[in-house]
Image (cartoon, grey):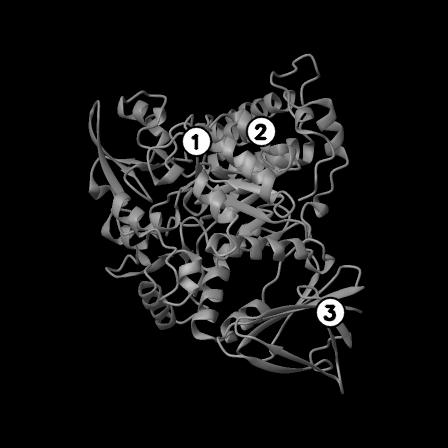
């Protein structure tokens, strides 16, 4: 992301400045917002609730400094992303020390080891929580005191852009909001989707509901006035919010802008696939959910244009890319969920055919959007996005190989009495390495916490981590140093800009090859990866592949190559990679 030209201290005031004139919402954005409110809540609802939404935006604006307001006038959305962007995803308590708080340790570690490689930090939910390692939020506006403070978060802004989680689909059952519902406080009665009996959802409607879990969609709780059943997409401790109540939407907008004031440059919209429940539908990625995301985008475009939205939507690829909208009205980034399982499949089978064919058709619909490419996450390796790309039997075979490597499989209910793999819970290291490789899965955490996702959520001691980072023989050193070395090379090459031209080449099923050409058409890089455990000898026909250079250098090794008789000859060791740079 574009490096800010002013310091973090000049972005937001601690207290609002109400002596300045009130914020004036541009008429074009005002019309877009009102149109969306009408779609969600009708003509009368839009008339009632728009003034409150405008008030929330005005309060946020009053916290902005004059420096920030002036800087935003020069901000160019098309330059938001560049080849220099690399996002580190981590838990706030990944590192534990004897005296320091985890976020203090995180600040020191990032500034010491990472600031010349990663330029964006995604600290996974750092709020007080009751379960799911942060994704059952007790209080959206507070930092978990066991981790640190808002000041610790802000201290990272001197060296990094920050990405926060907007866990806007659900809230902890122990949260104040839900406790007020249990008390039957009338202000919170409609904050959640509630039924008096299970018969409130017919069996036919239940079959239509798409969920990434096998648990019951309704969970019973005792309230002041008797038992109630509430909608729980993910777990009994994660209560879905009811966006049919406009007060819920307004609360979340206020929280969204609070995160911006606290330093967020990217907001990750967690599980937004399921924001809106409507019986008789799949209750997944409904039009209303898209409209809410677009409304968030309108609000940010109006008062915080430097902040981007990224949607975390683990659904089929064709549905996932819908969250780009028209390229300018919804998320600026979407998680590229199909990439991890397709890359894993390529390495498991030593065959890139499916990955290559899928990647050839991959595109974005504007110069202000891009994919968030990743291979593994704190949850594991989702496989839903690969359905329709890989046959079901191939996904089942992948699952068996994951089990053989010490991992677990999370299943989802298909609504017809059957279940299918939803996610592979395994570390990426264990998933792609041999069965006898040094174990990286945290099997002890799975047993202790009774949650398969814990296999990839290890907490490390400061002493252990620093020792491993200084030991060239340790897995941590080798993986970290190797990855950082690649990132340092990548961020210097304009051919790796997100908007650079890309062509995926079919050379042989044993390698994945992609040609990237810089936006000014002066340079290109041919990146070739051997996904097999065998040596590969290649003779690449430059004319057939429309490659316009004869001489090139592997920027990873500085070895030079010269084509002969129109053929570029390469010898790749098992699992070898080359990044061949040439001038066009």
Q: CA distance from mark 2 to mark 1?
A: 15 Å
Q: Is residue 241 above or below residue 327?
A: above
Mark with earlier residue (3, 2): 2
Which residue was labeled with disc 3? 553
Q: Helix, strand or loop at disc 1?
A: loop
Please state the horizontal and vertical placement of residue 460, each as a whole percent of the image: 42, 42
Q: Quadrant of residue 392?
A: bottom left
Q: CA distance from mark 3 to mark 1?
A: 47 Å
Mark nearest the camera among 3 and 2 is: 3
Q: Residue furthest top?
A: 19
Please state the horizontal and vertical placement of residue 67, each as a whole percent of the image: 74, 25
Which residue was labeled with disc 1? 127
**Residue in the picture at 36% in, 26% down:** 177
- Mark 3 near mark 2, Cβ–Cβ under 8 Å? no
Residue 154: assigned label = 2
Q: Quadrant of residue 197?
A: top left
Please state the horizontal and vertical placement of residue 306, each as a whole percent of the image: 66, 37
In this rendering, would 435 be left or right of 72?
left
């Amino acid at each position: 992301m574009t490096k800010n030209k002013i310091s973090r201290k000049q972005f937001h005031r601690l207290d609002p400045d109400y002596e300045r004139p009130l914020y004036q919402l541009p008429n074009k954005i005002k019309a877009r917002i009102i149109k969306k409110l009408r779609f969600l809540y009708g003509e009368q609802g839009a008339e009632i609730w728009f003034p409150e939404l405008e008030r929330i935006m005005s309060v946020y604006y009053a916290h902005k400094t004059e420096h920030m307001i002036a800087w935003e006038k020069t901000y160019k959305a098309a330059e938001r992303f560049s080849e220099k962007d690399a996002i580190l995803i981590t838990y706030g308590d990944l590192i534990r020390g004897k005296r320091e708080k985890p976020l203090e340790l995180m600040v020191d570690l990032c500034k010491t080891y990472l600031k010349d490689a990663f330029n964006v930090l995604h600290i996974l939910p750092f709020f007080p929580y009751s379960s799911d390692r942060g994704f059952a939020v007790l209080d959206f506006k507070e930092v978990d005191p066991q981790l640190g403070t808002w000041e610790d978060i802000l201290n990272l802004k001197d060296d990094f852009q920050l990405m926060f989680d907007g866990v806007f689909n659900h809230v902890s059952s122990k949260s104040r909001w839900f406790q007020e519902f249990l008390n039957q406080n009338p202000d919170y009665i409609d904050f959640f989707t509630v039924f008096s009996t299970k018969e409130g959802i017919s069996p036919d409607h239940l079959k239509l509901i798409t969920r990434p879990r096998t648990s019951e969609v309704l969970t019973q709780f005792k309230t002041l006035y008797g038992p109630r059943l509430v909608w729980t997409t993910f777990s009994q401790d994660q209560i879905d919010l009811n966006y049919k109540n406009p007060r819920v939407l307004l609360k979340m907008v206020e929280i969204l802008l609070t995160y911006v004031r606290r330093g967020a440059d990217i907001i990750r919209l967690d599980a937004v696939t399921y924001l809106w429940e409507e019986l008789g539908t799949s209750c997944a990625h409904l039009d209303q959910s898209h409209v809410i995301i677009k409304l968030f985008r309108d609000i940010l475009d109006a008062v915080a244009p430097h902040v981007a939205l990224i949607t975390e939507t683990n659904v089929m690829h064709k549905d996932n890319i819908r969250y780009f909208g028209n390229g300018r009205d919804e998320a600026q980034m979407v998680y590229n969920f199909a990439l991890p399982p397709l890359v894993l499949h390529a390495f498991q089978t030593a065959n890139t055919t499916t990955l290559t064919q899928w990647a050839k058709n991959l595109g974005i619909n504007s110069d202000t959007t891009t994919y968030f490419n990743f291979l593994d996450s704190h949850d594991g390796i989702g496989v839903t996005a690969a359905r329709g790309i890989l046959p079901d039997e191939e996904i089942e075979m992948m699952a068996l190989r994951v089990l053989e490597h010490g991992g677990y499989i999370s299943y989802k209910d298909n609504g017809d009495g059957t279940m299918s793999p939803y996610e592979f819970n395994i570390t990426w290291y264990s998933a792609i390495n041999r069965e006898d490789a040094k174990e990286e899965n945290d099997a002890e955490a799975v047993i202790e916490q009774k949650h398969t996702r814990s296999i990839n959520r290890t907490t490390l001691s400061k002493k252990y981590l620093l020792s491993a980072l200084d030991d060239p023989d340790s897995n941590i050193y080798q993986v970290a140093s190797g990855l950082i070395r690649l990132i340092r090379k990548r961020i210097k090459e304009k051919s790796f800009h997100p908007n650079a031209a890309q062509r995926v080449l079919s050379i042989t099923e044993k390698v994945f090859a992609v040609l990237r050409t810089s936006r000014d058409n002066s340079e290109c890089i041919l990146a070739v990866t051997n996904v097999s455990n065998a040596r590969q000898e290649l003779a690449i026909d430059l004319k057939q592949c429309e490659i316009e250079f004869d001489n090139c250098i592997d920027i990873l090794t500085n070895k030079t190559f010269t084509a002969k008789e129109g053929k570029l000859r390469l010898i790749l060791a098992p699992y070898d990679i080359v990044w061949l740079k040439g001038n066009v």
